[in-house]
Image: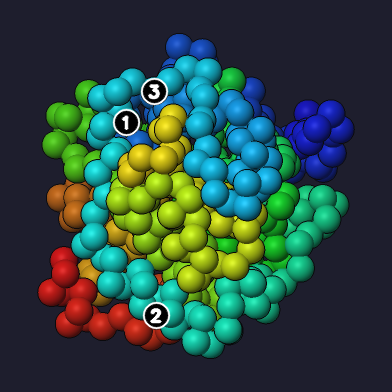
Amino acid sequence: MLESIRVTGTSIVLPPKPKSKIKRRHCSALPKPKQQPQLSRSFEKADDFSGKRFCILTAIKPTNLEKEKLRFFKSDYMYNPQFEYANPALRNVLAKHSNASDRFLKQSIHIMELTLQKYGSYEKFEQTTGGSLLSRPRIWSHVRKYMTKEGCLGEIVVHLTEDLLSRASMTVVNGCPTLTINVAAAREHWLEGMLRHEIGTHYFRGINNLQQPWNSWTGRRRHELKPNNPTEEGLASIHSVLFRKDPFLWRAALLYYTVYQASHMSFCELFRDIGTFVKDPSTRWDYCVRAKRGWTDTSQPGCFSKDQVYLDGILQILRYRESIDFHLLTALGKVSYEDVDRLKGLAVTENMRVPHFLQNHERYREHLEKIMEVNELTDRELQALI
């Protein structure tokens, strides 16, 4: 059976692997319907494993985004958007994600300043280190090459879209792991980092989690597991920049900073404020929308704080990088780095899936040190913070 990767009405059919492997790994061979909710939870990035994350992020995406963007730009950036929602998120859920932290604010600003010192502007940094935007055929080629390298060709349905606030997302749709890629953010030298983020981290940890005793909310409570975030997104974000020549933590830093500023500013004020770091109006709009998701009247201070989890997780992992077993951190599934030592004796470790870039431990740790160096992070600083 062939695995079809679909995009906007067209199909690209990838050659199958040997029949036995296709049968074992194809979407149709995933757990039966009664087990699918469990599969879905294994790919969730939310802390509570309640199965609500996808609904929450869908609920807080404004339905009148394009209309309000046009109005905002026509006002010369003076109008505060009034967002509408088809299914407004529960108040207690939004309340949980409305408190911004300033714990790593100094570090986020310093990381962005370092980047601008070297490249002059974010736009030059993006063009120089990210390269050109890829055409759809070239995106398919890169995705296929990466999946072949990881041995997961035929396991994941891939969609290309222009309607995504993030650069990519890994979800489960009708029981099938599904990777959605934003073609407007797919740059030549950054795409593989995105695939390491979504497939090499989220997908593999999700697959491994299925075999563990803590693959359900009941199991997590029984084993007293800590939330999988910020470890999950921190690890994925590290993998995004792992092999870059200049692995600046720009995106995680800007997301952290933008959320904090949004908690004190209106949309217009926030838009002007982040102009210090990003000149392009469309890029600034995207960051402001992410920070103000879930809010109706954006003239009021307020934020959706989830995006601070990336830098938070990165810095926690870098703080303890010398003592973390990164191979086990992936093999044990959706667990926090804090639980690895305690759980390793209870885990199922046979046939675990670990990405290729974790096979050479020495090289992996060398790249972690380079991330520390380029972003001017020191152990003394991280130990004081964490």
Of the residues shown, which amino acid type is indicated by label 3?
Answer: Ala
The crowd level at tag 1 (other Cα within 10 Å; few <14, some 14-19, many 20+) is some
Q: Which of 115 and 176 is in front in this view?
A: 115
Identify the residue at horizontal 47%, vertical 17% (top origin). 87
Q: Residue 53 carries which label?
A: none
Mark 1 secondary-structure assignment: helix
* Pointer 3 with pointer 1, Cβ within 8 A: yes
Give the camera-side residue of 103 and 181. Answer: 103
Query: Vertical placement of 82 versus 376: above or below?
Result: above
Residue occupied by mark 3: 89
Could you say which is closer to the camera, residue 308 or residue 214?
308
Q: How far apart are labels 2 and 3 at the CA level? A: 36 Å
Mark 1 highlights which residue? 94
How far apart are the two marked residues, 1 and 2, measured between alpha carbons? 32 Å
Amino acid type of the residue tagged 2 in the rendering: Asn
357 above or below 302? below
Answer with left or right where residue 107 lies relative to residue 248. left
Secondary structure type for disc 3? loop
Q: How far apart are marks 3 and 1 (CA)?
A: 7 Å
Q: Position of residue 233 (x, y in %)?
A: 39, 52
User: Is 117 in front, or is 162?
Assistant: 117
Q: Mark 2 points at which residue?
A: 375
Pointer 2 or 3: first along the chain: 3
Q: Which of marks 1 and 2 is nearer the N terminus?
A: 1
Could you say where residue 39 lies in the image, as x and y percent from the top left?
Answer: 45, 27
Q: Residues within 10 Å of mark 3 (few under 14, many from 20)?
A: some
> Where residue 100 sits in the image (x, y, percent)?
27, 49
353 horizontally vs 145: left or right: left
Q: Dividing the picture into quarters, in which one does residue 225 lie?
A: top left
- Point out residue 34 in the picture as x, y percentages from the top left corner: 45, 12
